[in-house]
Every structure is written in structure tokens, then in C-alpha cells.
Image (cartoon, helix red, strand yellow):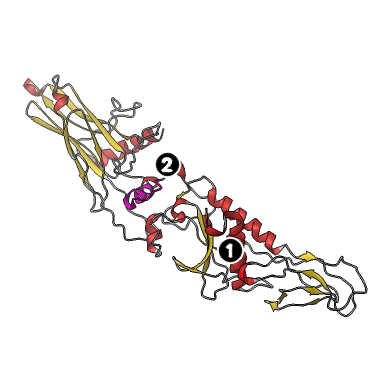
Amino acid sequence: MELDRARRLAWVLCVGIVAGCTGGKQEGGTGGSGPLAEDEAQVGEGRGRKVTLEITEAFTKGTGQAVPRTSFLSPEEQITVRARLINAPNGTEDHIRWTVRPTGKHTGPAVPDAHEGKEIIFRGSSSLLRDGSRQPNPPLEYEVVATATVEGKTLEARLPPTTFIRQDEQDIVRQEYADYGTLFRPSLTQISVPRSALLNTGNYAFIVEEDEGGLQELLTQVQSEVDRILGDDVQEKRVGTRRLRPDTVVVSPGPAVLEAGPLGDTNPQGDDVCGGPVVNGACAGPILAGRNGIAETRANNRTARVEVSRLVTSAFRNPQRNRAIGSQSLNSRHTRGRALDLDPRALSVPGKDARQLMCILEAAGDRVVGEGNSFTERGAATFLDCNDVTADHVHIQR
């Protein structure tokens, strides 16, 4: 269906672009959609016979693809273009001459770029730069010309590159992986429109995920672990307990969070008091019974929560974008849709400062992906303790 739609579009464009095109002809081609390009001439004695040269098919069929496409990945996928001659002497089709010309300096030469016969099968090549970019790459594209000489008349039919043969955006993305020589090479089924724009920090409308939905799943799991850390204070004394010493701990912080230590996440109620530091207007330590000696505070009554999705600064990055931001990792998990960078520094959370939030995020990542795959960084490659004041994000990867 996609091929037919593309060819119908090509036929419309052909009327205004390709010399010798005649709109309205519906013979030949695939699926009854007409030739992709054509030329004709009158031959014979008295010029009474019309001979037509038609380019009838142009397609790519990569490994594992059931349906031919008009786009391609260079150099892995072969491009096939076929032609025929109508009303020409037998055997003339075997001498159709083909020429394939790259469009733009970013497109490398076709291999082969010339042939003789009813069809040409060639591979593209890329001359795209690999020095990083925050802009999408242009598509690789080729002009394909077929010529034939019949009784002294030369006919020419050509496929304009703006219609055929030209990469679509999905193959432009895939081309970057081929150009960089990454270990992971995405298939078409691993390229999709992201469920959330937050997960796309690349140059294209599409993202690549080695496992479909993997980025959203990772984000959801980190959010769940952050919520658990913020909800792990311990009720040491049942609410309503009386005759307690004023310094009796009613609610204690949960386990230590990496270098940040124990972090309280409960506000005192009634006459109970905060027994630790107050950070951003909220208690970050234990809750004590206070002067009346009554336990009045219920653990984790704070309503403030960290919305992890707001902290995403980088998720999927295509190889060109990955290089542009300074990453030296050719096979970064970001390029495989398997990593998140989270920066909480601009977030104001009662009871927490930026360093504590960094530690909470790294600890949550440890629980989801293991300690070796969750770490605090500055820039693309400087590893730091989570409470280091120079840290600018937590990187979590699968």
C-alpha cells in the first residue's frame, strides 16, 4: 500500500518534472499505477510505430522485510530499478543503459553506478560527516536514468531524486548508525514515534528503542522507587501514645540514602517537633514527641513528591546528537533507547536540597538497574559522588 501511494505521488510529480512523461497512462508498472517515468519515439518507415521506454519499478527489499519499500539503508540494502521497452525489436531491452547519479555532496556514489540490461541493482553509499550535529541529516538520494536506442532514436526515462530514490526519515535515522559503525543497528521495527516528547532528545520525530517501550518502562520504574524512598519513614511510636519523653523519636527516617544518609520525609503534627535539619521549609530528620509527650505525627504525611518525568534532560539521542553533546561513547545506551539523564537541580522540594535529590535518584536507579548502571555525572563522562555540588545529572541505563 505504501509503495502504491508513493508511486501515485511520483506519477503526479512526473508530469511536471520528467521530460517525456505523459500523464494519464495507466499501463505497466506495479499494481496498475502506471509507469514511474517514460519516454517515447516514433520509429519505422514513415515513422508509423511508437516505441516507449518505461521505468516500471523501483524498490528496496532489505533482509527480513516482507514488503518492498522505496526508501533504503546504505550500504546494507540493495535498490532495484526495472524498465521495459514497448514495441521495440526483440532483445532491445537487454541493452537498456542505466546511470545512477548521487544528489548532493552528502550522498556517495552508487555501486555500481552504471549497467546494461532490463534492470539495475545497486547499493548506495554515504558521504555524511560524523562530527556531531544537533540538526537532522539530509536524506541520501539518487537520480536514476535509463536510456535506450531504437532504430537510431534515443529514448530517456529518469527517476527524479525528490520522488525516487530517496531515504525517508526512518532510514535517515538508521543511516547514522551505519555511518558511525555502532554495534547496535536498529531495524525498522525498533523505530517509533515516542509516547511522550520527554523521551525524545534527538534530532528527529522518531526514536530508537532496542526494546519497544523500554524508555517509558524505565521511567515508570524509577518513579516507583523514588516514591518508595520518599515513603520509607518508620513509625516508631503509635499515634496517640502518651507519657513520652520530649526527645522520644515518634517517626524516624528510613535507611540511609547513599552519601546523603538517612533522609526524613515526614512533617511534624500537633505539638511534635522536628529533631533534625529543616530544608526548603520542611523537616529532613526525625520527629520527636515534644513538650506534651504525646505521639501525634503519622509517618510520611508529607504530600510533596518528585515527579521524575519533569527531571528528564536526555533520553533517546541519535548518534549525531550524542556526539554533538560531547559523549565519546560510540555505543551509548542513549542511542539504543536504554538510558535516562535526570537533573533535579532546578526543582524545589520541601525537605530536600539538590544534592539529596541526586542521591535519591541514583539510589532509585540502583534498585531498578543495579549499582553499576546508575551513577551521578557532570557532563558526558565525569563520574561523581551523588552529593558532589558540581554534579549536574544522574544517568540511569539498562
Query: Disc 1 to disc 2, how far (Cα)?
Result: 33 Å
The numbered disc on residue 290 is none
Question: Looking at the image, which residue sits at the far top?
Answer: 90
Q: Position of residue 24 (x, y in %)?
A: 29, 30
User: Height in image: 205 above or below 27?
Assistant: below
Secondary element type, mark 1: helix
The residue at 33%/43% (across/down) is 73
Residue beneath disc 1? 362
Closest to the camera, between mark 1 and mark 2, is 1
Hey, which quadrant is residue 270 in on the image? bottom right
Q: Nearer the viewer, residue 39 or 83?
A: 83
Q: Nearer the viewer, residue 104 or 271?
A: 271
| 16 to the left or right of 191 | left
The residue at 90%/74% (across/down) is 244
Secondary element type, mark 2: helix
| 287 to the left or right of 363 | right
The numbered disc on residue 188 is 2
Question: Looking at the image, which residue sits at the far bottom?
Answer: 291
Q: Position of residue 116 (x, y in %)?
A: 15, 31
| 334 to the left or right of 231 | left
Question: Which mark is first along the chain, 2 or 1?
Answer: 2
User: Height in image: 70 above or below 295?
Assistant: above
Viewer can see residue 98: no
Main SS of the magenta part reads helix
What kind of residue is marked 2?
Answer: Leu
Q: Is residue 184 magenta?
A: yes
In which quadrant will I find the N terminus?
top left
Residue range (magenta): 172-185
